[in-house]
Amino acid sequence: MEKWRRSFNALWFAEFIAIMGFATSNPIIPLYLKELGVLDRARLNWWTGAISGFASLALAVFAPIWGSLADSYGRKLMLLRAMIGGAFIMGLLALTTAPWQVLTLKIMQGCVTGTVAAATVLTAGIVPQKEVGYRLGLMQMAVFMGNSLGPLVGGVVTDVAGSRMNFLLTAVLLAGAAVISMRNITEDFIPKPKSGSMLRNALPDLSVLTASPALIPLMFAIFGVQFANSIAGQLMPLIVMYMKGGQTGTGSLSGIIIGVASAAGAFGAVTVGKISQRFGYGRSLFFCIIGSCVFYIPQGFATEPWQLLVFRSLSGFFMGGTMPTVNALIANICDKTKQGSTYGLTSSVSNAGMAFGPAAGAVIATTAGYPAVFFTTSLLLGVIGLSVAGFSRRQAVNSTPGKT
């Protein structure tokens, strides 16, 4: 087997395990907050949005820093930092006794993790250019599969052994992913520090934006998609609990809904990642956004969890194809020696969207009810899709691999 294939396979498996670990515990945060005494619905919505939002905001702030350090000291090293740091912090979450402690540790998690960005830039660096779109689709598939299986495991563990066990399980999975990466991934990239000072090397490299102006509208699209998609995500256990009229079995049921939707996203990621090489990355991105927009609308009319499962799976399929196409576009545009900085900036924008989305969702749910959360998401995706279509026509980004 070729060296790059062996490294990619190990990276794929390690990232799948890492994301499954995070997804085991992240969806049950609202239920854990109830165990810690947050019983009022408005306060529960607020804490849920704040924890998810501030954690993503921390990721957004630190992603460009880790991206610059990846170019200076190695992409594999940054992946190991994210996995090992995450394992330590998730273990500490099992010891928390108050909501503010959960918030503090989740912010710390955002500061030191970011395995998706690290795996993305490592993938773009180790696979041949002609394979970039397909392999990034496979990597996104690993993310969605991890997000699919994790909530299923986490929901069952919560109902059987309690929420704290989820955090310990996440720590073990992240540590295992770090070991796999350390022993099986080979990186040919030769780091070139900009200076002898680590602090100076950590400064975000904004020159990639002036060198490739087409990155700017793509970043706006990334922010919009992630913002819209995260509006309802963290509220799913509460929405399911509202539909059921009680908490019994909510952990397992919400885990199934999140898991099946993520599985559909995994299928969408690898399918779109494959066909976009012929169909065009710009066109693929547009149809994925519009497809997700269409299937968010009936979620607002759902009255039973099974209805929510069906329509979230359909929207999840199309949403799954968005990031592989965006990342492939970026890989074709940016300088390979600055991929760490480039993906660090795009990861920052992505996490900024995921930071503000849950906060917006909490406000919308509290003031207008849960159905409004889905209608707002659909409206935003429609606007973003039309913007992408306009950008594609102006900049001719509907090119096949090897063209810009």
Image (cartoon, rainbow, N blue to C red):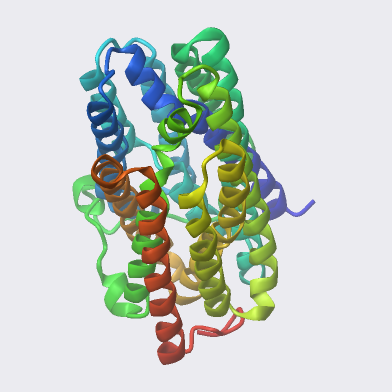
* Closest to the observer, 186 or 48: 48
Quadrant hosting residue 268 = bottom right
Residue 91 horizontal side relative to residue 317, left or right: left
Estimate the x, y position of residue 389 in percent, counting from the top left: 45, 82
Depth order, front residue of 337/49: 49
Q: Relative to 147, is 275 above or below?
A: below
Residue depicted at 56% across the width and 75% down the height: 281
Q: 318 or 79, which is in the foreground?
A: 318
Residue 9 in percent (x, y) is at 69, 46
Asked if residue 328 can be seen in this view, the reply is no
Residue 111 at least partly seen: yes
Residue at 41% x, 91% y is 394
- Residue 177, located in which quarter of the rendered image? top right
**Rendering quarter of residue 106:** top left
On the rendered structure, is 358 left or right of 402?
left
Q: Tell me if residue 154 comes above or below residue 160 in the rendering.
A: below
Asked if 10 appears above or below 337 in the picture, the reply is above
Q: How many marks?
A: 0
Q: Give the answer, above or below, for where 399 lies relative to 222.
A: below
- Which residue sits at x=51%, y=60%? 323
Residue occupying image coordinates x 48% and y 64%: 293
In percent of width and height, residue 121 lies at 48, 56
Percent x, y of residue 273? 64, 65
User: Quick one: 303 or 182, which is closer to the camera?
Assistant: 303
User: Furthest residue to the right?
Assistant: 1
